[in-house]
Amino acid sequence: MLDKLRTYFPLVEDIKEENLRRAVLETFVEGLEKGGWIPEDLKKIPATLLIPNCPFSFLEHTNAVTACALAMAREMKKIYGDRFLVDFDILIAGGLLHDVGKLLEIERTPEGGFRRSRSGRLLRHPLSGLALAALRGAPDTVLHIIACHSREGDAGKRTTEGILIHHADFSNFDPFLSS
């Protein structure tokens, strides 16, 4: 399963710190197993239930958000140099895991569609994702991104990495709401 996940999430290989890379992959394994999914389902699970017939998958959205946040950070680093402080390992890990809680929040219907699970009605994905990642040893800086990437983080202060993931997430969501 780990090899399949490495293929599905190629940016995980850009995480230099071995323990963090392992925590990201193990968090996905935990989420898939607890949610009753297999890796191939990542291509089918909708990125959101808020957009009817969502035109992109969990896998596509996760990779797009991570790549967009990484591109923003690289460009800002080029322009601002040492004045722009960002931890690329934390940024990538947070991007890959920002929606991992959706593996518990969403379930398949008997007819083959998707709906919010009982777990998802009780806990939104930022909270369940935080719990999954904490179980697998993700550091607080990554847990912060997961917990604060959505509206749950609006009242608090986000880290630099959290700001980038938050904006990349909504940049990969909001345009689909208006079309």
Image (spheres, rainbow, N blue to C red):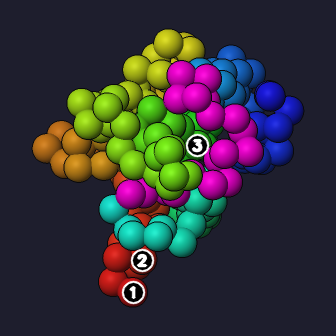
The answer to which quarter of the image holds residue 177 is bottom left
Residue placed at 22% from the left, 42% from the top?
Answer: 152
Q: Which labelled disc corresponds to residue 90? A: none
The answer to which quarter of the image holds residue 89 is top right
Q: Pick the residue in front: 19 or 62.
A: 62
Q: Which residue is mark 2?
A: 176
Report the amino acid beneath label 3.
Leu
Q: Which residues lie in the magenta part?
A: 32-49
Assign a secondary structure to mark 3.
helix
Report the amino acid beneath label 1.
Ser
Residue placed at 33% from the left, 62% from the top?
Answer: 50
Q: Residue furthest front?
A: 111
Residue 74 as seen in the image, left or right of residue 149: right
Q: Residue furthest left?
A: 155
Above or below 98: residue 167 = below
Q: Earlier in the sequence, mark 2 or mark 3?
A: 3
Residue 129 visible in rendering: yes
Separation (CA) of disc 2 from disc 1: 5 Å
Residue 98 visible in rendering: no
Q: Pick the residue in front: 35 or 82.
A: 35
Q: Which residue is mark 1?
A: 179
Q: Nearer the viewer, mark 1 or mark 3?
A: 1
Assign a secondary structure to mark 2.
helix
Q: Earlier in the sequence, mark 1 or mark 3?
A: 3
